[in-house]
Image: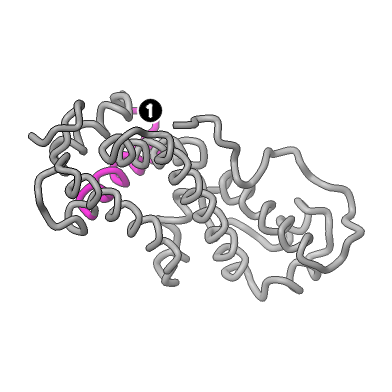
Amino acid sequence: MDETTSAPAGPRGGRQGRNPRGQGERLRDDVIAAALRLLNELGDDQALSMRAVAREVGVAATSVYIHFADRDALVLAALERFHGELVAAVDQAEAGAADPAGRLRARVLLLGRWVQQHPGLYKVLHESTLNQRVAMSFKQELAERTTAAVQRCIDAGLAPDDDAAAVSLDLRAAVHGAVSMRVNQPDLPWPPLEEQVDRFLAKLVGLTAGGRTE
């Protein structure tokens, strides 16, 4: 897995001067990138303001409203981009593994490491008020791909025959719990994420370190 995957929102300190481009798709991209940086810092969609995003980009607030009707629309667009980049990173990590068991492990580990790099965005994606009010259907893509990865382990005889969707749900619940607790209680003496992931894969999927079923 590539732990050096660059942050989708870009580094802080990348503020622009007054943006001469005005409207256009490039400005929209700049606004989304700025929102991602701020959301990762804040960890709270309600703390984000359109004016702060405009200042981050270096444009008037009216330029932001040309592309996004309100804060919710902007946050939703930012989260969809963030999630899309997460899916791509997980797929890339999976592609480097040798067999279905290794690919499933790679997916889960990359998710955990991605969250460690972007804790504020993770909180907004899964714990924000917007998440409670708006159906983020794009999040289903990652869930479906994890289920497919579990099914490949079952088909290859590396995991016991079971309902892949149910196993995937249990696995995702465990992983999200582990990473969420790390984000919200970072000072606890957490074991290495790899050790927890291997326990989840053994107990919930039926994999062992060698890829055999228990």
- Horizontal side of 70 relative to 177 (left or right) equals right
Query: Is 170 located above or below residue 179 in the figure?
Result: below
Q: x and y percent of residue 210 in the render?
A: 19, 26
Q: Quadrant of the N terminus?
A: top left
Q: Which residues are magenta?
A: 169-188
Residue at figure coordinates x 79%, y 45% from the top left: 15
Q: Quadrant of the C terminus?
A: top left
Q: x and y percent of residue 153 in the render?
A: 22, 45
- SS for callout 1: loop
Looking at the rendered structure, the kind of residue marked 1 is: Asp
Q: Main secondary structure of the magenta part?
A: helix
> What residue does disc 1 label?
187
- Horizontal side of 20 relative to 62 (left or right) equals right
Residue at figure coordinates x 14%, y 32% from the top left: 212
Q: x and y percent of residue 134 in the render?
A: 44, 72
Q: x and y percent of residue 140 in the render?
A: 38, 63
Label 1 CA crowd tier, 10 Å (few <14, some 14–19, many 20+): few
- Horizontal side of 167 relative to 51 (left or right) equals left
**Residue 185 lies in magenta, yes or no?**
yes
**Residue 176 lies in magenta, yes or no?**
yes
Residue at figure coordinates x 49%, y 55% from the top left: 83
Q: Nearer the viewer, residue 48 or 20?
A: 20
